[in-house]
Amino acid sequence: MPAGTYSIESLSTGDVAQRERAEFWREHIGSYQSRMGYRYARQDNFRGETVRQHTDTYQLVRFWSDEIEYSRTSRQVRQDPDENYRLLLPLGGQILLRQDDQEARLTPGTGALVTFGAPFQCLQNAATHAFILTIPAHEVNGPMNRESPLATGLDLSRGLGRVVGSVLTDLYEERDNLTDAQFNAVSDRVVELLCMLVVGDDRPDASGHLAQVEAMVRRYVREHAADPELTGAAMARALGWSLRQVQLALQHVGTTPRELIREERLRLVRDRLRCAEFAHMTINDLAYASGFSSASALSTAFRQRFGLSPREMRYGSR
């Protein structure tokens, strides 16, 4: 993911004239949620606020508003397809949710996992404030090996459910101190726990957990390989794990943080040697721009890995 996609946006209907607030809210919610219907208890002075955190992968919104009903019809589902899921977690008030002939009354300590790929009705009272986390469909369908697992009335008051709620609260409260990778990593872990909660299994699969950690570590290293300060401890800190967790996950596939960082840096140099865009850079320049301490350190590691020097690969690629 390109750097800089993590954003935080706050909005209040108090920023516009009373008569414009209902339409303002409709346009605001419609700018980042798929097409829905809106029915207000009163339109003359509708009040609401949102705080939205998002990257290209996940979106967390904390909101409160006056009484309102949201709906999504079959026609809207066809016109504006959206297979992604929303985790709805009330913090105050009550939400009445109907989907697929099921109904749930959500209050603090409960939650629901719903899909925008099917019609629904969602009525919240005037005292409601809540979290809503948007989750890519493949992050749920893959681990659960099925599609559209509507789950209502999830118990978030104890055990694994309480952990899910606590992590979301922390993700919100630390919103100004997070990077793209950190926001995505924590969201990934929320989804992992949520899937376990939905299927009623609160016993983590150790090998599956390590595989997820490994995948996130590899993604982080690819994105930050050129950083000369990148270390195992630095990546663990950025991703919110202990160094030992990272080491165990990589050990599971026969490598170490140091070896993974070196491998990604060597791949970066190799790709740049083959790319005309970097033809103007000397080997020394490439070494420093790819996280190596010197050209000699690069050359030694490069020959060990690819069987020829950087200069030989550049010459041979022309």
Image (tube, helix red, strand yellow):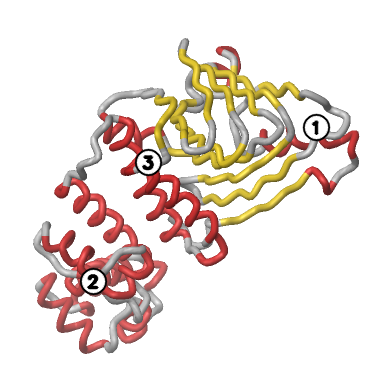
- Per the image, the residue denoted by label 2 is 266
Q: Residue at x 36, y 84 (%)?
A: 285
Label 2 sits on what residue type?
Leu
Q: Nearer the viewer, residue 210 or 297?
A: 210
Residue 46 located left or right of residue 297: right
Q: Does dot 2 land on a helix, a strand or a loop?
A: helix
| Image position of 305 (left or right of 108) | left
Q: Earlier in the sequence, mark 3 or mark 1?
A: 1
Label 3: few (<14), some or many (≥20) within 10 Å?
many
Q: CA distance from mark 2 to mark 3?
A: 43 Å
Between marks 3 and 1 in the image, the one whose residue lies nearer the viewer: 3
Residue furthest to the top: 101
Badge 3 amino acid: Gly
Residue that mark 3 sits on: 161
Label number found at residue 87: none
Marks 1 and 2, the one that precedes in the sequence: 1
Q: Determine whether 209 is above or below 101 in the image.
A: below
Identify which amino acid the numbered label 1 is placed on: Ala
198 vs 227: above or below = above
Circle nearer the viewer, 2 or 3:
3
Number of marks drawn: 3
Residue marked by disc 1 = 22
Instruction: Answer with left or right where residue 25 lies relative to residue 151.
Output: right
Q: Residue at x 40, y 78 (%)?
A: 280
Residue reaching furthest front?
158
Residue occupying image coordinates x 18% and y 67%: 247
Give the image quarter of residue 175. Answer: bottom right
Position of 312 with respect to 281 (left or right) is left
Looking at the figure, which quarter contains the C terminus?
Answer: bottom left
- Tell me what residue is drawn at x 53 percent, y 46 percent: 60
